[in-house]
Amino acid sequence: MPSLRKKEELRPSQVFMARQIIKRQCVFLAAEMGVGKTAAALTAALRLLYEGAVRYVLIVAPLYVAENTWPEEINEWEHLRRLDYVVVTGTPKQRLKALHEDHQIYIINRENVAWLYRTLKKKDWKFDMLIYDESSRLKSGKYFTTGGEKKTSRLSEFGSLARVRHKFDYVCLLTGTPAPKGIIDLWGQAYICDGGQRLGPTKSSYLERYFDSDYMGWKFTPKPWAEDAVMDKLSDIMVSMRTEDYVDLPPVVSTTLKVDLSSKIMREYRQFERDLVSDAYDVEACSRGVLTNKLLQFANGSMYRMNEDFDPPKRELVRIHDAKISALESVMNEAGDEPVLLAYGFKFDIKQIKRKFPKAVTVDEDPNWKRKWDKGRIPLLLAHPGSVGHGLNMQYGGFIQCWYGLTWSLEYYQQFNKRLQRSGQKADRVFIHHIVANGTVDETVLSVMTERGATQDKITERVRARVLTSAKN
């Protein structure tokens, strides 16, 4: 792993991004994973700080990324080591101590943004530049969230940033997946970027102008002209960059490993898919929406069921098959001594995998997993795609990935697939294996996930159509 890099080693794409951040003041940087957004944003912040254009920078990121990726990036570049930063995470006492120290850059995890606002409020808010990493998390645009035993409403992360938006002279949003569900995801991000200048001051007005809704107001469909109109509105602040256009990365070799379930298991699967009730395993799906998730569980080898004999009802696990284990064994045999990064879908996947591969490690059980992975000391690393999908540089530890259980989230799928295909990867190819159960919902999810420009709605609608067809038959 390289210890120190020179400023001259910044790629032209990174220099371009840094200039856009400085020039535009508010910029929505929709750049794919691997383009080098982190170093570019820090380079821009460094210049703005030393020119006196800004005094204090707030960086918001997912927890692990805040604690590890951003500090690592600062310490990896010679010119960025001039930056004085502090990580504002941990206990309330630790956060307060860090917050009251005088630094140029404060790095905080997104879960603590509302705490930061409550602590400082507008009066003591000193940050005049915001860098928000993985801004697609702002897509809901909700000002309040409900939590706690009393179910009281509290100001959300989005609401907190919206309240102090006017305090920021510079805003930079970073994301590799700006709109997983289409343009409906853009209002919240655009508002934090420009304060509502381009897409309107409220989400309701945005939805009313650009979308048609069903009579209940639950489902929104973009008007025929809406996408072009929205993108035109954002054209002066939104910068889109594709990895393949700017970075010479090793190609990805994507494979699908099909596994067959026994004829008995497949009959049980079809009956469950048709009736929403599995007689064989005493599992019931209360709706077709729940069914689609249950079918993914079934394809992976187990299902959760509720035992009504307990008060309150107790969740139990029912084992069905181990068909995917043999395919994983094939992946491991082919990998030899090379480490494998594996995405699981459900907690029970971990138990199945560890029975066969006891040396497997999950990211939750070892706080030092990242360091060990980078050194090649973990033969099989198990991770939910939501836990390692954003911003982590994992290319130093291996070049083989495997999907044991697929995800419904297009964002998680795309992000996870970019953990190893990144700048600094030494292998000449990156392998991504998909273990898929023949004739199951696995096939449907994978086919839509791999379509260029797929959206979450397209995925769910495709699965819904399949389930309804099965019910009719």
Image (cartoon, rainbow, N blue to C red):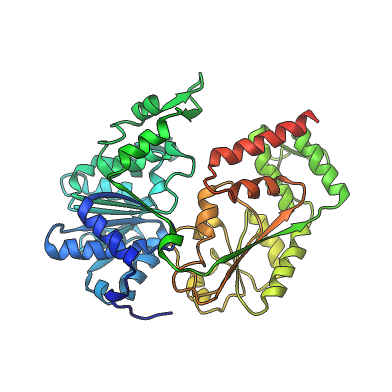
In this view, the residue in front, 198 or 191, is 198
Quadrant where the C terminus is found in the figure = top right
Q: Kindly give the residue lying farthest to the left in the view shown.
A: 52
Name the image quarter holding residue 269. top right
Q: Is residue 178 above or below residue 66?
A: above
Q: What is the x, y in percent for residue 243?
A: 44, 60
Q: What is the x, y in percent for residue 175?
A: 39, 53
Q: Is residue 443 left or right of residue 129?
A: right
Q: What is the x, y in percent for residue 43?
A: 26, 65
The answer to whether residue 298 shows anywhere in this view is yes
Residue at the image point whose x is 88% and y is 47% from the top: 264
Q: Is residue 123 left or right of residue 450?
A: left
Tell me how many marks there are. 0
In this view, the residue in front, 367 or 386, is 386
Q: Kindly give the residue lying farthest to the top in the view shown.
A: 215
Q: Is residue 128 left or right of residue 341?
A: left
Residue at the image point whose x is 74% and y is 32% from the top: 469
The answer to whether residue 316 shows anywhere in this view is no
Residue at the image point whose x is 71% and y is 61% from the top: 352
Q: What is the x, y in percent for residue 97?
A: 25, 62
Residue at the image point whose x is 27% and y is 40% from the top: 162
